[in-house]
Amino acid sequence: MQLDNITIAVRPRSNGEAMDLGLRLVQTHSRALYGPWLMILLPLFIVLNIFLSEHLWVAVAIVWWLKPLYDRILLYVLSRALFGQTPTVRETINNLRGILSNGLIAQLTYLRLSPRRSFLLPVWQLEDLRGAARRERVRVLTGSASAQAVWLTIVCVHIETSITLGLYGLIYMFLPQDTEISALAPFFSDAPPYWIEVVSNCLYLLAIAIVEPFYVAAGFMLYIQRRTQLEAWDIEIRFRRLAQRLSTAGATAALVLVAVFMLGPVDSAHAQPTAQTPPTADESKRAIDEILAHKDFSITKTITTWIPEWKWKNKNKNDTDLSAFATLQKIVAAGLKLILIVLVLGIVLYLIINRRLWLDAYIRKKPRAIETPTALFGMDIQPESLPSNVADAARSLWQQGKQREALSLLYRGSLSHLVNHDALALNSAMTESDVVTCARSANILPVRVDYLSRLTQVWKTLAYGHRQPGDDQAQHLFSDWPQHFARPGPA
């Protein structure tokens, strides 16, 4: 995670302002969000409505219950777009295995009805914590943001319901006026026609598509706001930028000092500042009143708006003629059937045209040249930059009281070994958790992956949480490192 690449202004915000920023993030990256999300959701929705045609309410219930699965796709795109690495649709689809790992089963079972779901999703998906460490992390993060996360869920549920009912009302607005309210009777009957249930499911799917991306983005930005408060991201970024400015302004400062010495001493008579008496409270109040009395501070503006006047006709419901509505049912049913056929054919045609896109990703997987990175997370991972015995050098630094440098060297040596000797495909857009996930999915021994996971957790705790590990824990890391990442000798 590169804080220097973050695309928003990192500063203390209120929780409400942070959630509003999430809505803006969805608007900015809507194409990258909706592309892979709909590619997963729409085929599943169509298949469920076809195979559960006798129980379509089960189909829509499954679509609702699987929301945590779709939310992970949205969070993957948002987390990378926030740091200037907006993934393409293809990159998102290719990373589905890593996106859907770590905690998905729990989120689809006993955590499915959690009112803080969008706020805690980044902890499960991005921080790759487990057990007691994850529970402690959740306890620390919730704090003052817990109530806002719950209210976010409540508000979004009401908005989703309101949109669904509003779409029913929109359909009614386009019906002939002589059908009256009974035109909506099939939607609420005990045994509605098949096409009515399909329309109802489509309306709910549309409501999900409108609300869910904003729900995930608002929860994610609430999580970022909480981390900014706890880890002082804004201060860290300002210090980094200050250091950059000072490094570039060094020569200018030297020239200024030379100019000051060349000018010689300044006359003390001119150097003494003029003593001024600060105004009293009454004088300050009179000055403020005079400024506020100026015409520039008393501008009035009249705004005229047009408000439509709706006139509803009261007709006798007993005289309703449903023959026109019966004809409308047949037309809509035929239209929906045609739309479903065209949609299925379009998906099949798209898969045929873009067969190389998914064949290369899931079947062929042709090997391609991978560019070996020379630095990750701001660390030089080239073999020549490391000592011959990384573990002993790190232990020596630890004994000198340089805990951060010791663990940084150990972690840097691990990354160098993974990239240069194991040919693990890593890039600068990955986080520390992504490295562990990538190593776990590659052909690397499980014991080495377990050690890498332990080392990564200790390093993140020290680098971001500023909590030093115990001496025993560090010594175990130093002792076990040569068993997994020792540099191979010459052939």
Image (cartoon, rainbow, N blue to C red):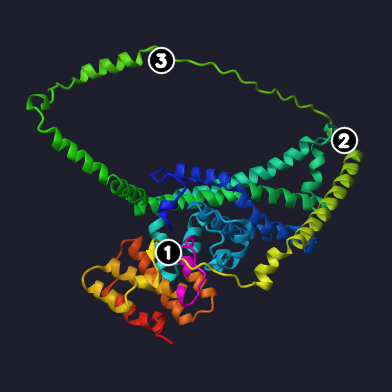
Query: Hey, which residue is sitting farthest front in the picture?
Result: 262
Residue 251 left/right relative to 362? left
Q: In this view, does 278 lie above or below 243?
A: above
Magenta-drawn segment = 420-435
Q: What element carries label 1?
A: strand
User: Residue 483, image x and y in percent?
Assistant: 39, 84
Q: Earlier in the sequence, mark 1 or mark 3?
A: 3
Instruction: Name the kind of residue labelled 3 in the image.
Output: Asp
Q: Earlier in the sequence, mark 1 or mark 2?
A: 2
* Marks 1/3: CA–CA distance: 56 Å
Residue 281 left/right relative to 321? left
Q: Is residue 131 above or below residue 59?
A: below
| Quarter of the image with the N terminus in it | bottom left
- Label of residue 112 in the image: none
Answer with the quarter of the image where residue 302 lies.
Answer: top right
* Marks 1/2: CA–CA distance: 72 Å
Q: What element carries label 2?
A: loop
Provide the residue designation for mark 2.
320
Q: Earlier in the sequence, mark 3 or mark 2?
A: 3
User: Residue 107, image x and y in percent?
Assistant: 55, 64
Give the foreground label among 1 and 3. Answer: 1
* Marks 3/2: CA–CA distance: 62 Å
Q: How crowded is mark 3: few (under 14 residues within 10 Å), some or many (20 or more)?
A: few
Provide the residue designation for mark 3.
296
Provide the residue designation for mark 1.
376
